[in-house]
Amino acid sequence: MRRNVDIAIAGGGLTGCLTALVLQRKFPSAKIVLLDQQQGLAQQDPRGLALALRTQQVLAEHGVWQGDLLKSPAIQHIHVSDANSPGTTTMHASKEGLPALGYVAMAGALQQELSNRCAEAAFEHLQGVQVASINAENSALVLGLSDEQQIAAKLVIVAEGSNSATRAKLGIAMQQQTYPQVAVAAKVRFAKQHQNWAYERFTAEGPAALLPQGTQEAALVWCMHPENAQQLQTANAAAQVRAVQDIFGAAPGRIAEVDYQATFPLQLAMAERFIGYRAVVLGNACHTLHPVAGQGYNLGVRDILDLAANIKANDFGAAEGLNRYQALRERDYAEIVGLTHGLVAVFSNQEPLWRNLRSKGLYALRACSGLKKPLMRKAMGFRSLW
Ligand SMILES: Cc1cc2nc3c(=O)[nH]c(=O)nc-3n(C[C@H](O)[C@H](O)[C@H](O)COP(=O)(O)OP(=O)(O)OC[C@H]3O[C@@H](n4cnc5c(N)ncnc54)[C@H](O)[C@@H]3O)c2cc1C
């Protein structure tokens, strides 16, 4: 059976679900179909995600900031330090006149709320299906699905994550580089309340972040060599607590408990182009970043906003709108990839000159709000860095 729709979205993860909600709200009469290979919700994702202020605003505007997300603490203060040099810097929402520097959401809770809103929405949500084939026609792309359905769409949006099969079917290649570290996700409990502080610590092996949860807990994301991750995972409870306390030092106070959750591989990947004939790749299907500054999903949310602002209801897949979109995204990607990859490179360099510059850099940030502000604006999900 062949059906015509305006927009087909492949991939119902954090990016795909929000894309469907944003486009349905902006274009209420558009016929949208969202499809995902999974049946039901994925296994609970144990990562704590640092969400930029703009991302949280978009989620709230689309009714997603509900349920467990309402308990997500706002980040009021950030402490950044380097394990190999004395420099530190702190940032405070009140000093910047902001309600928060960002928010923390557990990825599993966010996916749950996004899926709930998609289930209530007016568009069709097909689960347990994949794109098996793609054929270009005069004014549509025709998707052959794994359940034998055919969908002719004016615009196909690919949000299938890093290993997207549909992106490959569109002939869009990825440039990829694997980092020699993995990220360990764990739950941490402090001896005292965290008072909405987040901590980022740069080490020779990679950065570690404590993102506040509840009143006395934090989500830990710690980047390290795979063999050290293996050791940490199998260490006893006391050794795990000691390892985390040693990394962060005295700044976050005494750590009472560490509960290891999972290990994630890390890569830097970027699609060679972000659009094709009547097609767009976005979110992790287009870019996969190092989690150092917590920017991956935030960047995907800006993909969605730029796409919604540049496509037109008279022909959603028209080349003009997609070209405008690609030009806008190029600049944002260049800034964010430069920021995250640059942080990893600069903070893992142990040459004395770099150590000295790093410590001066963090002192400079502390002293000079003129430098800190543009970086903060970008990290909070607002537009240009400079
Ligand atoms: C350790 C770690 C920490 C991070 N921390 C942060 C942070 O603090 N802040 C932040 O902003 N970002 C962070 N990120 C990045 C963030 O997790 C990702 O950017 C985000 O999850 C990407 O979502 P996505 O929907 O694009 O892709 P995915 O989450 O990979 O979802 C893809 C979806 O597509 C579906 N799918 C896949 N293939 C197919 C197919 N062939 N057909 C149909 N459906 C398909 C899958 O079932 C899934 O539902 C972090 C990442 C890591 C690894």
Image: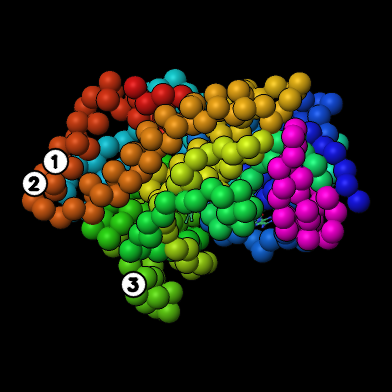
Q: Using the image as rendered, state which of residue 202 and residue 118 is in the foreground.
A: 118
Asked if the residue at tag 3 contacts the one at tag 1, i.e. Cβ–Cβ closer than 8 Å, the answer is no
Q: Which residue appears at 72% of the width and 47% of the height?
A: 135
Q: Specify the quadrant of the image occupied by residue 137.
A: top right
Q: Is residue 142 magenta?
A: yes
Task: Using the rendered image of the protein, determine whether residue 336 is visible from the camera's viewpoint.
Answer: yes
* Distance from the alpha carbon under mark 3 to that under mark 2: 27 Å
Q: Which residue is mark 1?
A: 357
Q: Is residue 204 magenta?
A: no
Q: Which residue appears at 19% of the width and 31% of the height?
A: 364
The magenta region covers 125-150
* Residue 56 at x, y percent in the picture: 59, 34
* Residue 371 at x, y percent in the picture: 27, 25
Indicate the colouring scheme: rainbow
Q: Secondary structure at mark 3?
A: helix
Amino acid type, mark 1 = Leu
Amino acid type, mark 3 = Asn
Furthest-front residue in this view: 138
Q: Which residue appears at 66% of the width and 36% of the height?
A: 278
* Residue 69 at x, y percent in the picture: 65, 44
Say above or below: 157 vs 109: above
Amino acid type, mark 2 = Leu
Q: Earlier in the sequence, mark 3 or mark 2?
A: 3
* Distance from the alpha carbon under mark 2 to that under mark 1: 6 Å
Q: Which residue is mark 2?
A: 353
Q: Earlier in the sequence, mark 1 or mark 3?
A: 3
Q: Secondary structure at mark 1?
A: helix
Asked if the residue at tag 2 contacts the one at tag 3, i.e. Cβ–Cβ closer than 8 Å, the answer is no
* Image position of 90 (left or right of 64): left
